[in-house]
Image (spheres, rainbow, N blue to C red):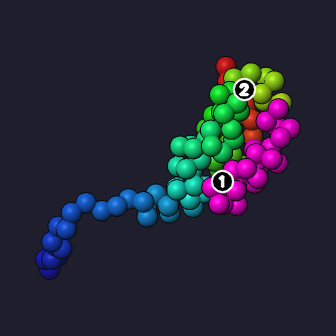
Amino acid sequence: MTRRRQPYDGPKRIQGGVERVMKHLHAPKVDVVQALFADWEGCVGELIAAHSRPVGVADGTLSIEVDEAAWASELAWMSGELIERISTRLDTNEINEISVKLTR
């Protein structure tokens, strides 16, 4: 029995596949992560963005790296406000916790 091949109709978009993988990993939607990384300064403000960067999102937790211990304390203290800012800016409720680490 010979299998009939479908005619080639060009490249396929991979976003649907990426969305399925992200969901399986309990990560937010691709467009939310992309917007967060692309518009980090808009989400958290110029001063915070100058000392921090997002590094990942999993199970509703946003991981942030900071360049000084004082910023780690400050961001941990204001995590509720940051979650609210990000949620409002990106129109999402997929981030509900923040983890802050000091870069070495």
**In this rendering, is residue 32 above or below 9?**
above
Q: Which mark is residue 23?
A: none
Residue hosting label 1: 89
| Residue interval drawn in magenta | 74-98
Residue 99's quadrant in the figure?
top right
Q: Amino acid at mark 1?
A: Arg
Main SS of the magenta part reads helix
CB under 8 Å between discs 2 and 1: no
Seen at 67% across and 19% down, the residue is 104
66 sits to left or right of 28? right
Q: Is residue 17 left or right of residue 56?
A: left
Residue placed at 18% from the left, 74% from the top?
A: 6
Instruction: Give the secondary structure at mark 1.
Output: helix
Whether residue 56 can be seen here: no
Q: Position of residue 58 (x, y in %)?
A: 65, 50
Percent from the top left, x then y, of residue 47?
Answer: 70, 30
What amino acid is at disc 2? Answer: Leu
Provide the residue designation for mark 2: 102
